């Protein structure tokens, strides 16, 4: 069994069919199911709200989640890691810069999303003056008190799991995935990932988004099958 191997998996643009759809790649999910049978644990690490992330992980049979870009985790129990943002500040930011808030904002507490995803200097100045941080995932702007992004939640998760970082694999596609990559020995970028992410990756898949996930996890499963045979 390989229960010391952990896969950290981004959602949007990674487990989906493409970067422009919410539809999940079902073949990639099947590969995840197969590799879990080998004892590998798989966690969603996403900027999405906790209810959406937790519900999705539950129905897909995954091992837990890191949600709100590192501010909430679930592994056996729920845990919050960041300072909450006052709803008045969220509304002020949205109105001042004529942005559209994510439909998930009503379910968020720590990391709020806005559209369009274009990051501008005056927005950053507004946020920093209030002790907040602003990032773009390429899909949305994210406003939070958390300056380390997904790294915060992933660091806590790995501590709870008690795994060595040499056994951690992170797969993603966007700038906000760089934070979780810092804690992974193997950094995997799908082929249509942001160039900054591909620049730090150990592996860049041939396939895009979910196709790339399927490609990498299938190759990992084959390697683990071979390892198991040699140790029998």
Image: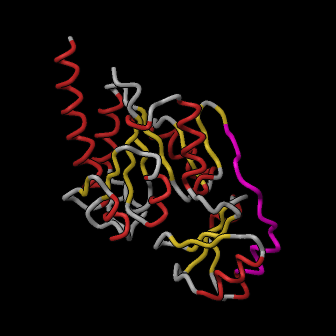
Q: Where does residue 51 sit, x and y in percent of width and height?
A: 63, 50
Is 194 rendered above or below residue 216? below
Who's the residue at 70% across and 81% down the image? 94
**Which quadrant holds residue 144?**
bottom right
In the rendered structure, the answer to whether residue 123 lies left or right of residue 36 reads right
Q: Name the residue at the top extreme.
A: 232
Camera-side residue: 79 or 162? 162
Who's the residue at 47% across and 30% down the image? 163
User: Which residues make up the magenta segment?
Assistant: 78-93
Is 147 rendered above or below residue 60? below
Is 123 rendered above or below residue 80? below
Q: Where does residue 158 sit, x and y in percent of width and height?
A: 53, 37
Camera-side residue: 104 or 63? 63
Q: Where does residue 9 sit, x and y in percent of width and height?
A: 42, 48
Q: Quadrant of the C terminus?
A: top left
Colour mapping used in the image: secondary structure
Q: Quadrant of the N terminus?
A: top left
Who's the residue at 61% across and 75% down the image? 114
Q: How many marks?
A: 0
**Which quadrant holds residue 108?**
bottom right
**Which quadrant holds residue 15?**
bottom left
Q: Where does residue 66 sit, x and y in percent of width and height?
A: 56, 47
> Is residue 91 found inside the magenta-colored segment of the image?
yes
Who's the residue at 35% across and 24% down the image? 2
> Is residue 214 found inside the magenta-colored segment of the image?
no
In the rendered structure, the answer to whether residue 103 lies left or right of residue 62 reads right
């Amino acid at each position: 069994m390989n229960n010391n191997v952990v896969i950290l998996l981004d959602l949007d643009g990674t487990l989906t069919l493409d970067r422009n759809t919410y539809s999940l790649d079902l073949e990639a999910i099947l590969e995840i199911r197969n590799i879990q049978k080998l004892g590998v644990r798989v966690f969603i690490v996403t900027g999405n709200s906790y209810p959406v992330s937790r519900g999705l992980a539950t129905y897909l049979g995954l091992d837990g989640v890191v949600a709100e870009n590192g501010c909430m985790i679930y592994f056996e129990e729920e845990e919050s890691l960041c300072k909450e943002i006052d709803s008045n500040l969220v509304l002020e930011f949205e109105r001042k810069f004529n942005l559209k808030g994510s439909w998930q904002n009503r379910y968020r507490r720590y990391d709020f999303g806005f559209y369009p995803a274009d990051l501008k200097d005056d927005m950053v100045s507004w946020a920093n003056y209030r002790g907040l941080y602003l990032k773009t995932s390429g899909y949305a702007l994210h406003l939070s008190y958390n300056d380390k992004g997904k790294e915060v939640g992933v660091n806590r998760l790995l501590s709870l799991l008690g795994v060595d970082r040499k056994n951690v694999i992170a797969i993603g596609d966007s700038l906000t995935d760089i934070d979780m990559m810092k804690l992974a020995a193997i950094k995997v970028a799908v082929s249509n990932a942001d160039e900054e992410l591909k620049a730090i990756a150990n592996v860049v898949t041939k396939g895009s988004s979910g196709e790339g996930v399927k490609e990498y996890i299938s190759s990992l499963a084959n390697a683990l099958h071979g390892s198991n045979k040699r140790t029998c």
